[in-house]
Image (tube, rainbow, N blue to C red):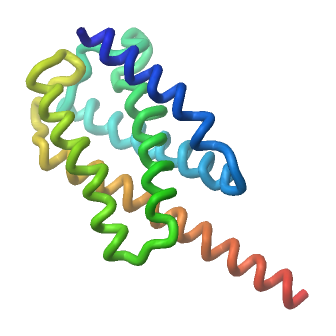
Amino acid sequence: MEKKLLNVLTALCIVSLPFLFKGSKMRENLVIFFSKGVLSTLIDAYVVGTKRIEYPFRPLANIFKTNILYDMVFFPILSVIWVKISYNDNFGKILLKSLIFSVPMSIGQWYFEKTSRLFKWKKWTVLHTFGSVSFTLFTIRAFVGLIKKLDKFKSNQNITD
């Protein structure tokens, strides 16, 4: 069952990639994708290293202790989608829209922790998942806000030159 779940997740991720990285904001979306991959991998490496979570069934298990499919593909894709739907929103709307991602992901992880061998929570709860997903979403969204401000500053500077 676990192999089928990971194969379905991999297929969904591969199919979604061309749709996410087209258009005028492709460079920004790539920055979001790779930034989230790095952030997720660092956090997950810490969590796995401190034995809070274990991934008994994962791709490339002989190389990585974390699930690289989650950290480097799935979560980054979700972050690109989240930034796209919250790109022009104020802080209140961003907070509400973050729940669209963090609540289902937390519930999904709780369900799969109970019914599969994809991961095993040792010193971890659904609230930890909710907090870590929310933290990484807001960190990436703040990073995008910084990029937008820098682009605006750069374009204003070019006008005055």
Whole-percent x, y for residue 138 in the image? 38, 61
Which image quarter is the N terminus in?
top left
Residue 4, compared with residue 102, is above or below; it is above
Residue sitting at x 13%, y 38%: 124
Residue 74 or residue 36, whichever sits in front: 74
Residue sitting at x 41%, y 77%: 90
For the image, the number of numbered tags is 0
Whole-percent x, y for residue 159 in the image? 85, 86
110 vs 74, left or right, is left
Residue 60, compared with residue 16, is above or below; it is above
Quadrant of the image occupied by residue 119:
top left
Q: Tell which residue pokes out farthest to the bottom in this image.
A: 160
27 vs 38, left or right, is right
Whole-percent x, y for residue 155 in the image? 77, 78
Residue 1, compared with residue 43, is above or below; it is above
Residue sitting at x 30%, y 50%: 101
Residue sitting at x 32%, y 9%: 3
Which image quarter is the C terminus in?
bottom right
